[in-house]
Image (tube, rainbow, N blue to C red):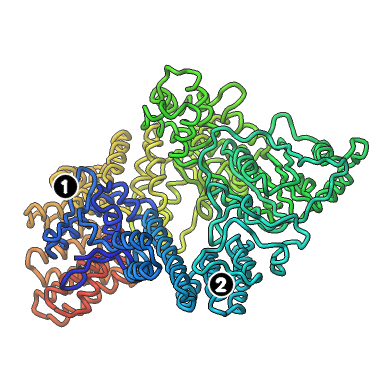
Amino acid sequence: MEFRLLGTVSVETLTGPLPLGPAKRRSLLAALLLSANTPVSLGRLTECLWDDEPPSQARGVIQGHVSRLRALLAGADAEAYGVELATLGDAYVLRAPETLLDSQRFEELLMLAREQRGPADAVLMFKEALSLWQGPALSGAFAGPPLRVAAHSLEESRLATVEQLSRAYGALGEHHRAAALLTAETAAHPLRESLAAELMLALFRAGRQSEALDRFHRTRRLLADELGIDPGHELADAYALILRGAPGPPGAAPPKSAGPTPAAVPPGSGRSPDAAGPCGAEGPSRVAGGGTDAAAPAPPRPPFPAAPPSPAGEPHPVDLLPRAPRGFHGRAAELAALSRSAAGEAPVCLVTGPAGVGKTALALQWAHRNPALFPDGRLFADLRGFSAAGEPALIDVLREFLLALGVSPRRVPESVPAAAALFRSLTARRRLLVVLDNARDSATVRTLLPGGADCVTLVTSRHRLEGLIASDAARPVPLDTLETDDGTALLAGVLGEERVLAEPVAARRLSELCGGLPLALRVTAARLAGRPRWTLAALAGELADERGRLAYLDVDDTGVAAALRLTVQHLPPGAVHQLARLGHHPGGHYDPYAAAALAGTDPVTARAALEQLAAAHLVTETAPGRWVLHDLVRLYARSLDPASAREALIGVLDHCIATALAAADTAEPGGEPCFVLPEDFRRPSAVQDFADRAEAMRWLATEREDLALTALAAREAGLDDRAWRIILLQWPQMVWRVRDSWSPLLELALESARAEKDAYAESRVLTLLGWVLTEEGRTAEAAALLERSPVLAREAGDPLGEATALVNLAVVQAELGELPTALENCARAVELTRGEGDRHTEMLTLQHLARMHLTAHRPQEALDCARTALDLGPEHEEAARRSLLLAVCGEARLALGDEEDGVRLLDRAAQEAERDGYDEGAVRALEVLLRVSGRTEFRRRHDEALRRLAEES
């Protein structure tokens, strides 16, 4: 038995590979093998199997895949090989000898190769290690984030092995072999500079100098075109050695401590022939392939012209930077992004994000970590774009810059244009960093941009400054909140690791309550630092109360509310009004329709306000037309206009009702409406229009969580007439995904209906809840609820509601063995719908009556009912219902002895279900087909439908 990760995830046995099945099962196996002999938690497995939010039944899906995998291993006599898939509490462990795992053998061979004294033996080991690879790592699996990281790590190890093998070939003098090996890998990884450098040297040592130089220029152009960067030190060093005709000792990597001489600089590389000196050992560190070193994320900038002496003859570089931030944590990706953005000609780097997210700290951290890049100095100005003190005059900022550059006070121009022109002139041949902190608009920044092609400007702002991006190609580096681990690290930096490690759960809770906002975390840490007897858990308990959270996050003159207030005071009144109303939304997401309902405006006005709030980083657009508020911003927004809370809530509740009605009507055209609107219903200024059923169902699925939160808020506010309606209107989604844990939400609707003493509402909710419980296998509970539903519908004068209730009750009665009673109730339901002239509901009742006749072994009656139902509905009738009716017809035909027609009808039922994505219906029809036909096509379609169902889970 052999487990393979270096290629397609598989289990090889003496009789061939095990049939692992769907990609998610391979992902599960890969996750267990990557941590072989170590327990893997259910949470970790969930991250590996789902890229986005996992489904509510994720645990059950994982358990099913584990069960199937365990059965496959048992069938392959895994125990004889010492292999066991065990359950340990809330985790699983795959116990197996390491020799059975190809990735472990790969690592062992690498260790042996490095221990060999002679290159010939090392070559044999490296080649054997690489022979284990049969394609990209973890192929065939659904790669969730942890698996993508693992696959990338394995691939990096493989490429490093290829480079080591090429050097071993070089040590043997087999440069042609090294070149052939590297040529294939370089074609697959054209941006990996270390591979290109090794190939250049191998080609040169093989006597192919022109090819080596051509490889350099091709790689240089590719880096410029694809990444906008210049070659790093490995490529440049290899190029210089080739030009000098001294490629270094055979098999040696390109030297990393010495750069090319000025004469060796290639044309067009952006380096000046009068450069002060090459980037040597003290220059910026760089990872092959254009990335940056996380420990020193310096951009791969070329040498610059020597700066001319300043007007005052200042011998030392000017440095106006404030001190480096204390307790800085995380942000490795953003620091690297800044380094990449700073490469090129006269770059303008733009760090944007909400108040308190740490923009200034990031900018200063990067600036202090890269002093060698700016030998002529670093300038800094706080533009106070969001300060209560107001912005400084531009002439004052320019005067400070000019004085720092050595200009005599008497020579500083009095006008802004003249001072800006002098600043650009003085910086034209310098290598300067200019940090412009807290900029409010693009025009201010443009005036302060330096004139040198080798200067870097770093701007921070709470606004997106899209004008600066358009006019000066500013490169945005958006800054988001900290991850929980980085947040707890920040707390530890202030409080000390011992205090945080003593309460790790409380520390993580504090990070979550602060929303990962560095300002909030620092205020929290300051409160705790001054009170050594306070526990982290006690403060977390205080912060958990939303009513006082913002007050706790203010200390002295620093705090979240103060920072947000300075942002808000620069907004137009319409945006402030919209923000205040957003704070009263009980859900987490907003679209222009919901925002308009909250603010009492229209979607066009609301969208404009949302765009203004997004530009100020007060809301975040997570998808086109869909925004969210940070929790602390939401609390602040709520405080802006507390008196409008109920009015805003009613507005968004009625918006939800109107939009859900439109969605239900589109998803189920011709369906009987669930209810009349509340007496004081306020119709929104505009209601979203749905193009087709798919779009309507997508909205219901996307908004499910927010609709639930909105219904709960309505219940808590005593608006029960809205609460049950919002829940009940989701019935098309409940029908489509009936086993998706709807019962708690329907129980909330039942509480609201009973609080209203509304027999109509209670009956409708009971009918739907009873059906959901039936599908969940809770038949006894369903029967108890459904017994009351037809009675309530009769009391409320709701014959169609009574008919639906009777049908659902009949389904339960049939399952409990009371088939005659079930048939009577279905027949009564058909009579009620015919009396009301409602063809859609009549079709539903006939469908169930047909199924009951089939269960009672009355195939002809079943066939008659199903045909009558199909005649009632148009061709575009709901796919699920048509498929189920056609399946009943097919089964009835089989029971009557007409196998050919039965197979034809069942095939048609399956095809209609497959066409419309109703995989459950397809599985049902195909299962019946497989009982009477052995056609491979039916088996294939059945298995594919089952696979789709598993993937949807």
Q: Quadrant of the N terminus?
A: bottom left
Q: Say left or right for 914 vs 431.
A: left
Q: Is residue 405 above or below residue 212?
A: above
Q: Residue at x 11, y 63 (%)?
A: 77
Q: Residue at x 52, y 31 (%)?
A: 520
Mark 1–mark 2 contact, CB under 8 Å? no
Instruction: Report the mark closest to the observer, 1 or 2.
Output: 2
Q: Secondary structure at mark 2?
A: helix
Residue identified by numbered label 1: 778
Given the image, on which type of amino acid does mark 2 rest? Met
Q: Say left or right for 3 vs 687.
A: left
* Mark 2 neighbour density, 10 Å: few (under 14) some (14–19) many (20 or more): many
How far from the left and from the top, in percent, is residue 70? 17, 58
Q: Residue 200: give its label.
A: 2
Q: Residue at x 48, y 73 (%)?
A: 182
Given the image, on which type of amino acid does mark 1 rest? Arg
Residue sitting nearer the eye, 370 or 605: 370
Q: Is residue 524 above or below residue 590?
A: above
- Mark 1 or mark 2: name the one nearer the start of the chain: 2
* Mark 1 neighbour density, 10 Å: few (under 14) some (14–19) many (20 or more): some
Q: Secondary structure at mark 1?
A: loop
Q: Say left or right for 774 vs 601.
A: left
Q: Quadrant of the C terminus?
A: bottom left
Q: Residue lying farthest right?
A: 410
In the rendered image, which quarter is residue 824 located in?
bottom left
